[in-house]
Image: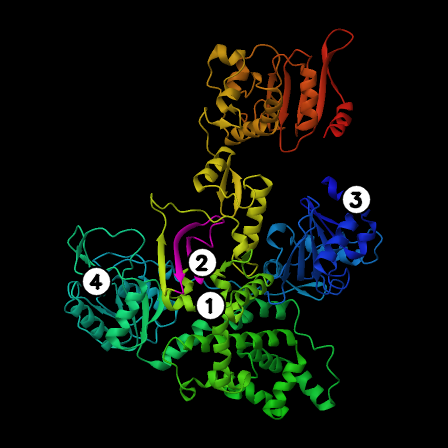
Amino acid sequence: MPEPLQGAVGKRVADHVYGHVTALAAWPDALRARIEHAATLARVTPGEHFNVVKMHALGEQLSLLAYEDFDAVPFPTLSKSWRVNVVTATVVYRDYADSRNPPVLHRKELLLSPDDPRIPGYAALTRTAEALGLFDDPSRIGFREQWLARIASRGYALQGDEFIPIANVEDVQDVAPTAVLAGPIQRHLTALSRTNLSAPVQALWRHGLIGSERTFFDYGCGKGDDVRTLRANGIDASGWDPHYCPDAGVRTADTVNLGFVVNVIDSLDERAEALHRAYACADGVLAVAAMLASQQPPDGRVHGDGYLTSRNTFQKYFTQVQLRDFIEHVLDESAIAVGPGVFFVFKDKGLEQRFLRRRYGARAAHALQGTWLRMAQVARAPAPRREREPKPGREAAFIASHQTQLHALWLAHVEVGRPPLPDELAPELVEQLSAGGAWSTLCRIATSAFDDAPRERAARQKQQDLIVFAALQQFGKRQPYRDLEVGLQRDIRHHFGDYQALRDAAKRSLGELSRPEHLHAACVEASERGLGWLEDSHSLQLHTQLVPKLPALLRIYIACATVLVGDIADFDLVKIHVRSGKVTLLSFEDFDASPLPRLRQRVKVKLKELDLDLFDYGSAAYPSPILYAKSRFINEECAHYPEQLEFEAQCERLGLMPPAGAEPDAADFFASLETRRWRIDGYRLVRSQDAPALDAACGRFLTYRHLIECGETQRRTKLPNLPRQPDSYTALYELAAFILDPVIEYFGMIELSYGFCSAELARAIPGRIAPTLDQHAGHELNRRGKPICERLGAACDFVVTDEDMEEVALWVAAHTPFDRLYFYGKDRPIHVSYSNTPARQFVRMGPNASGTRVPRIDRSVLLYRRENR
């Protein structure tokens, strides 16, 4: 245990210790004083605001944690945390109230003092969990969703403090999208063959504007790859192209695509005519896509308002604003940006309303019906509120006999963010509830019978959604109240009373966008709820998946950018610049699948100028930088969050990451990774299985050749002496990095007399050697496939010229994590080894009474080591 944490009673995880507040009395005075100071900085009180302390390894940082129902819940979840640095006097607060996947606490008994009477009960539950294999991979169960999934995967459900076997395990994984529909791309329509859908067609698909119930027509379909892919997915799709499909005929359809057509037409009149004809084909919506100008000058020579390419084809490069203005000028209709270079124009205004409502509304209801509701039903069914007043006998009997139906009504209330009306529910459910009296009475009974918190959160979220929706209406043709959908009208009446009150609230929010202090306050609120990384007072950066949970002001701020750039779902991260009036959107390669994703595209939207800058990465001129510390920009509700945390912790433990603010170049990082014999496998660092070059660096001062081609016998025989096992190279690197590098840095260069020893070299060495014990064979195998030396690791013999080798040996014992060290004399080489399970054994080789040199373990060296740490 690190020295600052010595004497702390609690649960040890890596270099940290967790302790319940009731156990702090047994902690050393210095640690308790630090906790009291931290609580003062955070303005919280032990037992009242927090019940667990997490002391960090360095001692200067600690976390004050509030777990809900620590005593009553077998595996409590975290509700609030305060991470305090007592040196810099800074506090980072996080509220998990709205999180669907908060951290979960296991092994509660380890946090208590040894005489606590609660330990036997907690320990019994832990033993049951261990027997079920629930702790086999502890790095994957730290959050509620993963923990419940692990329990279900073992065929059990947690009810109260018992694991109850279930007959069948529900598959709770989301259905993966069809492979052919994955991966948005952007390619111009000049006779290219595609393997995936084009960008505008993917945007239509993503927004539900392509489906089995809707017809699709591609105006200017090229080789028809989009049409063929959609047909393969059961869509009624057709296309026309003047070159490839001139006889197919032009038809009307619900959804029409004009993808990368206007940018290849060099006549402005013909461009407008193509847009008119395509729009005339659309009964519902038209998608228009064109090439955008990037930061790099286009290839080709100027021709009209575009360029002629080397293949003698024409390209017109629009800016986002130019494309929008062209569409709106020609069609006299609003063009809605859904991506860089992609716009939707709706002929069906009802469809447009539904699209805008889905786009700017929160996705919390869908998420709530997913994992969170499964947790509520499996792990802990919704319980009646303890504080409600006693019900009359008839009402209590109705609740008891209609639990399932009332729960369904409560879920519907949570989903819509207000009391639902009968026509919004299944008729059979309404009929089953009819015996309970008037509909308002039924809604009151349902809301009083189950937990208020989800319903109140849903109501707040709905209010925010409506404000965002109304604010964005200011940028287009506003619909009168009578033309709004019935559900939207009901939402407005319930939450704001009338349409004008909602508009007034939206205008106030728009007015606040010009006030940096309001934006900053909203960013602080978002950060405290785990929504992004707040960089001082000038920016908040977060995953686009988290945007619907942001405060309304920030959602409106981002939505203003989408008027220019389109749907932020095409991007991975969004950066809100608090004071400069800018929003930056970033797209990465394999963001979800990689712990270190590479930047692919950056779009900086300048709201004051109503313009954007587009930066593409991945070329020699603009290499793709790596995103380090990805966990800062996502949270526990995002894919692979636990794995990302573990990956970053592993990098930190291995010293692979520099201090914050000094992020290395991608090439330097991967070169360092290779030098240290690591490679990335998914979200884990595993040892490299490649054989390095002999002259590659092995530690800071040596090469592999130094440790392989050394010793009298190797020089005489010229044997290659190469390891056959990749792990032998890794062991040599660890020997050099952890033992030899410190020695060379302190004493100067060493002289190696014996290093790695292959089976061939061992047979050529005269005299007595012990390959099965001395670790010179590294991880090499014998003829039976077993390690030659079961101690594994690696070893070498060396001497430091003009140094007393006893002093060198004692220094090695005191300052390095050696495995075994053999000392032969003050002027002779020492033998030292390193392994992942160091024995820390110091052996002196001295003569016995007959003069034979024999080993003697020197235990006094352990005392010397402690005194010289």
> The residue tagged with tag 3: helix, strand or loop?
loop
Decide which of 518, 1 is in the foreground and name it.
518
Mark 3, Cα crowd under 10 Å, few <14 / some 14-19 / many 20+, is few
Answer above or below: position of 653 versus 740.
Answer: below
Q: Position of residue 258 (x, y in %)?
A: 25, 68
Local secondary structure at mark 2: loop
- The residue lying toward the viewer, choosing from 618 and 606, is 606
Relative to 93, say whether 716 is above or below.
above
Mark 1, other Cα within 10 Å: few <14 / some 14–19 / many ≥20: many
**Location of mark 4 (residue):** 222
The picture places residue 602, in percent across and down from the top left corner, at 39, 55
Q: Which residues are magenta?
A: 580-608
Q: Earlier in the sequence, mark 2 or mark 1?
A: 1
Which amino acid, by three-letter code, is at mark 3?
A: Gly
Of 678 and 491, nearer the camera is: 491
Q: Quick one: which residue is furthest to the top in this view?
A: 850
Residue 555 image point, x, y percent? 48, 68
Tag 2 residue:
572
Q: Residue at x 45, y 66 (%)?
A: 558
- Say which quarter of the image contains residue 394: bottom right
The residue labelled by disc 1 is 557
